[in-house]
């Protein structure tokens, strides 16, 4: 697990990793036969260039911040909650399920109810992974991964089975929600101010809980040393379940917001892999919650900018994913090198 | 092959594991290597087997220095080490394990060679069986045959008689004699069991505190060996604690308990403790004392029997209930089990005393830091503290109202001054009627501080005596499996 470092060191590491990532990306782009500078320019401008682009990036930023904040909880407790993808999906499923009985729309209270339902769905899915870990001795990585596939299967079954649109069951998802059940978005974009506010609040809340409450301290203690946590009477197994449930609830909230705020229906790919991206963010942040929003924004811009790649350069948009991966690998490389030099210095 | 150790030193950080060991091992002999835990036996053997390098000094093979050894290089030179835990792959069959690391052979060839070698020593190993199905003794035989097949001329056996049957032991000893006498190989038998060393060896080497304390030829005298092994430590004991108040009734008892740990069990242990009593546990590591401490703390399973405290049965209850009953466990591995490496001192206090919130926590930690003489800032992380400071932090975190304090090696790794501080504090606790049970590798420490002493040997409680009626020498004898009447 990561150890806590000073802000300066982690920022320095990040910069070094960025430089390394830039070099590696340039190499990859060159191999793909594209002009590297132009590619990078498109990625950045494509995500920042106009108000509309910025709104798009902000819309991506919301689920990323929610999920990264959620993962701060599990990371603090020393857990690798890979199952966050499934938890997002279950949030979306529960929210959709909650709103399905109201095809003619309703009040804002219903939307709030859907968000609550989403949180419960995500929390239950996370609780399953947590119980597998504490009772079944299945590591949360494997349990989570398995549950992700189950969640995906569940959505597909719902979309093509019991919740299929009359006449046409298709990958385009379930019947759209009544417009009164949509979260209001800023003109023409999919950016909802309510979601933005929720994401910000959740982030601040998690940061506060982790830095200033007894419960947050207990989670960190469990993450640092489970044996000692047991001896201190901190009930590590219960803390692990709490962290999982908390994380799942927030991930479920992200999923529910994708339904009521962005797509207005349940889609097969409703999570857009934001869970995995958030895992990268949480790893990069390594306990420094302050830099989570910045990192999320960076990834959101990349995400939105990459849509321009096929249009302008005939490159595949998956390049954004490659860059994200390269960035994370670079970060760990930098960390690894640092460790190596420290060991060398010590032995000399 | 003749092996010569020349002035071998080995340091791990500030810990000195070997300090200037020089000795010669001749072929065709069985050497016994004796010493208590931490005397440096394993370190010395690991260097010969190439697992670690000496900090200073060299090892000569037939008078020649071979430079840096690695495990495979050492094996190439003919040095093979048989570990306490057999080094096999449980999921593979016997013949597959046998073939590993050796010459390329097909199955028929491998089985043939295995049986040929096995017959010589009367080892009967089923070639198609998986290693998991074998007993520890059989796995050891398999390991030994593998090493012989690889051409090992110098065989190191690390505590080979732990966990094997009497018959297996006899077979093993016969094999060792045969290997040394008929085949001229060098055998090094690492043990703490005196009787076995006396029975088997042509020469016994005793290590104490990283030095060669003695090199003896038969006839061996047990009391001389015990003396060399345990010696009289130089005043590490310090002052004795408070007197035991006589008229207090036991508040805790362990009745005919069978205690089950991860690696072994301790059966039929009975014990009762009075308020303010200090009980010292003597025994070589892995002989039962750690299990007793952990069972009384509620950390390991009690399969049979009862733990009764203040009329309440505790066995089978979760650890939290033991804690609520006023039992506190103090682990030997400070950073691994006792503290949170990256949390600060203040955060530790916050976790240990959750009712004091906000500012009181800082006051509490500052007071704790002063009272326990922890030389560190309140916001320093536990990882950055020295061993002594970590120990004092652990002490400072013990709740106020404790009835029973269970300590594993309370002064291990501490210098004399730091050790004295620890005992000063523990004595203070005893005056307030807290009972202590502690284990230690330092027999003087046990003798000095205990009201009562329990000795463990071979996973059994072999003695329970008032401190006045047992000497350090006798403890040593009992720990090494020698009868009391000596």
Image (cartoon, rainbow, N blue to C red):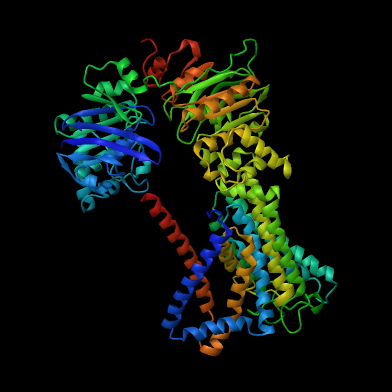
Q: Residue furthest right?
A: A107
Q: Residue at x 47, y 83 (%)?
A: A36
From the top left corner, tell me how far across and down residue A9 is, in percent: 53, 60
The answer, for residue B44, to whether it is visible in the render is: yes
In-front residue for pair B440/B112: B440
x and y percentages locating residue B396 in the rendered image? 61, 34
Percent position of residue B252, x then y: 62, 21
Q: Seen in the image, is B323 located left or right of residue B452?
A: right
Image location (x, y in percent) of residue B189: 27, 30
Q: Tag count in the figure?
A: 0
Q: Nearer the viewer, residue B232 or A262?
A: B232
B438 is higher (above) or lower (below) than A242: above
Asked if A116 appears above or below B391 in the picture, the reply is below
Q: Residue at the spot x=53%, y=74% of the render?
A: A321
Question: Which quarter of the picture shows residue A190?
Answer: bottom right
The residue sitting at 19% across, 40% down in the picture is B60
Q: Quadrant of the rendered structure where residue A249 is?
A: bottom right
């Amino acid at each position: 697990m990561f150890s806590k470092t000073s802000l300066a060191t982690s920022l320095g590491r990040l910069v070094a990793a960025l430089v390394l990532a830039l070099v590696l990306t340039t190499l990859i782009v060159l191999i793909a036969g594209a002009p590297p500078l132009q590619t990078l320019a498109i990625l950045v401008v494509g995500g920042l260039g106009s108000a509309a682009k910025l709104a798009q990036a902000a819309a991506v930023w919301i689920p990323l911040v929610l999920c990264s904040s959620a993962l701060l909880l599990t990371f603090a407790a020393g857990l690798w909650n890979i199952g966050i993808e499934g938890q997002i999906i279950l949030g979306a499923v529960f929210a959709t399920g909650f709103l399905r009985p109201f095809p003619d729309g309703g009040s804002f209270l219903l939307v709030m109810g859907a968000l609550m339902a989403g949180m419960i769905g995500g929390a239950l899915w996370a609780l399953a992974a947590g119980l597998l870990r504490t009772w079944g001795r299945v590591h949360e990585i494997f349990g989570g991964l398995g549950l992700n596939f189950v969640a995906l299967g569940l959505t597909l079954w719902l979309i093509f089975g019991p919740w299929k649109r009359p006449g046409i069951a298709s990958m385009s998802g379930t019947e759209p929600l009544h417009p009164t059940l949509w979260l209001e978005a800023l003109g023409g974009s999919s950016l909802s101010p309510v979601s933005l506010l929720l994401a910000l609040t959740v982030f601040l809340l998690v940061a506060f809980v982790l830095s200033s409450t007894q419960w947050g301290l207990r989670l960190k203690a469990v993450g640092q040393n489970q044996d000692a946590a047991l001896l201190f009477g901190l009930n590590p197994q219960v803390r692990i379940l709490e962290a999982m449930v908390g994380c799942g609830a927030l991930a479920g909230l992200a999923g529910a917001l994708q339904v009521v705020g962005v797509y207005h229906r349940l889609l097969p790919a409703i999570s857009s892999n934001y869970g995995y991206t958030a895992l990268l963010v949480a790893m990069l942040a390594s306990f420094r919650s302050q830099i989570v929003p910045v990192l999320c924004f960076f990834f959101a811009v990349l995400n939105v900018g990459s849509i321009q790649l096929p249009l302008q350069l005939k490159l595949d948009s998956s390049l954004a994913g490659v860059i994200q991966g390269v960035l994370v690998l670079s970060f760990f490389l930098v960390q690894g090198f640092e460790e190596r030099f420290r060991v060398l210095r010590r032995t000399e | 092959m003749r092996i010569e150790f020349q002035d071998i030193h080995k340091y791990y950080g500030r810990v000195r594991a070997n300090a200037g060991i020089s000795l010669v091992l001749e072929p065709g002999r069985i050497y016994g290597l004796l010493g208590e835990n931490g005397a440096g036996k394993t370190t010395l053997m690991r260097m010969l087997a190439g697992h670690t390098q000496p900090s200073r000094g060299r090892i000569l093979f037939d008078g020649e220095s071979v430079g840096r050894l690695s495990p495979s290089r050492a094996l190439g030179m003919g040095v093979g080490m048989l570990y306490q835990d057999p080094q096999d792959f449980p999921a593979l069959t016997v013949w597959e394990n046998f073939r590993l690391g050796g010459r390329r052979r097909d199955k028929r060839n491998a089985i043939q060679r295995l049986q040929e070698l096995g017959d010589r020593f009367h080892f009967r190993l089923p070639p198609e069986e998986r290693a998991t199905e074998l007993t520890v003794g059989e796995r050891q035989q398999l390991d030994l045959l593998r090493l012989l097949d690889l051409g090992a001329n110098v065989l190191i056996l690390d505590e080979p008689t732990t966990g094997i049957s009497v018959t297996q032991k006899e077979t093993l000893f016969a094999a060792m004699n045969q290997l040394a006498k008929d085949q001229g190989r060098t055998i090094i038998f690492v043990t703490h069991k005196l009787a076995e060393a006396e029975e088997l060896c042509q020469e016994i080497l005793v290590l104490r505190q990283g030095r060669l304390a003695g090199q003896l030829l038969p006839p061996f005298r047990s009391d001389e060996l015990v003396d060399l092994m345990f010696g009289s430590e130089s005043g590490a004991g310090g002052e004795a604690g408070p007197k035991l108040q006589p008229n207090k009734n036991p508040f805790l008892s362990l009745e005919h308990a069978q205690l089950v740990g991860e690696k072994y069990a301790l059966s039929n242990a009975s014990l009762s403790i009075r308020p303010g009593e200090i009980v010292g546990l003597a025994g070589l590591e892995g002989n039962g004392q750690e299990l007793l401490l952990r069972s009384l703390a509620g950390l390991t399973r009690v399969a049979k029997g009862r733990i009764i405290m203040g009329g309440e049965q505790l066995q089978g209850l979760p650890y939290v209930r033991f804690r609520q009953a006023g039992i506190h466990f103090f682990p030997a591995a400070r950073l691994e089990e006792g503290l949170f490496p990256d949390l600060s001192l203040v955060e530790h206090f916050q976790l240990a005393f959750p009712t004091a919130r906000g500012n009181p926590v800082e006051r509490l930690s500052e007071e704790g830091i002063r009272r326990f003489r922890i030389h560190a800032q309140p916001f320093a992380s536990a990882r950055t503290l020295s061993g002594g400071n970590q120990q004092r932090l652990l002490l400072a975190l013990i709740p106020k109202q404790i009835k029973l304090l269970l300590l594993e090696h309370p002064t291990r790794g501490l210098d004399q001054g730091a050790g004295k501080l620890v005992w000063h504090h523990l004595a203070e606790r005893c005056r307030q009627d807290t009972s202590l049970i502690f284990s230690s590798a330092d027999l003087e420490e046990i003798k000095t501080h205990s009201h009562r002493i329990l000795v463990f040997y071979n996973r059994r409680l072999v003695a329970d005596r008032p401190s006045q009626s047992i000497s350090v020498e006798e403890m040593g004898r009992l720990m090494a499996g020698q009868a009391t009447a000596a």
